[in-house]
Image (cartoon, helix red, strand yellow):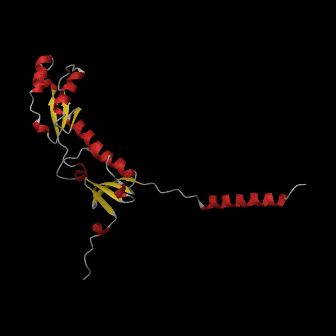
Amino acid sequence: MEPIVNKVAESPIKVVNLEEILGDVRVETFDIADHLENGFILREKAFRKAVSEQDWSHLKGAHLAVTCSTDAIIPTWVYMLIASEAGDVAESVRTGTEDTVKDAVCAEILRSTDWSQFEDLIVVLKGCGGRSVPPAAYAEATLGLKKVAQKVMYGEPCSSVHVWRRPKAIAPEAGDESSAKAAKIGSIRSATSAGPRD
């Protein structure tokens, strides 16, 4: 009886799990509206007090998304104040929603990733996992892989969707190459037959 061969394992396909590259990207949110009077009116003294007394310890290892869930007009110094207090604990302090901040953090990680290990390989970006990987991360990874990989797919090796393939180099057609050689030979003969002039 012939041994069972795992063709997937022996194929030149490399499965990339973005969860392993990104790690645990945790984002916490600070809603400015929660510290405004009626969600709209900024009382500077009260706001400064609230920010200075805020317990930021839960931000250790996390990124902070500073947002405002109402249409209140927020002065620029407010964001600066929050960053000055939370920045000593948080991995980073950014403006935006939880989703937009996570997208930005993931993009930065993937832009700094060395993709050269996937040179000339067929790469499948793993589609299912335990943690949620934002679509923006898959887009960023695709841009990085296009520079080195032979082909990029999404899903699993046994069930994947084609995304991109490196274009084949366009070689000159036989007829064009023959014509070019003939033209070159003809020009040499013409120059030789003319001979030196007196």
Tell me the quarter of the image containing the N terminus: bottom left
The answer to which quarter of the image holds residue 25 is top left
Left or right: where 147 falls relative to 160: right
Quadrant location of the C terminus in the rendered image: bottom right
Q: Nearer the viewer, residue 178 or 80?
A: 80
Identify which residue is drawn at 71% across, 58% down: 183
- The residue lying at 21 percent from left, 49 percent from top is 23
| 183 relative position to 113: left or right | right
- Say whether residue 28 is left or right of residue 8: left
Residue 162 % position (x, y): 34, 54
Quadrant of residue 153 within the rendered picture:
bottom left
> Residue 106: x, y in percent?
26, 43
Query: Which residue is at 9% across, 32% downward?
Result: 55
Q: Residue at x 16, y 34 (%)?
A: 29
Q: Would you say residue 111 is visible in this rendering? A: yes
The answer to which of 170 and 120 lies nearer the viewer is 120
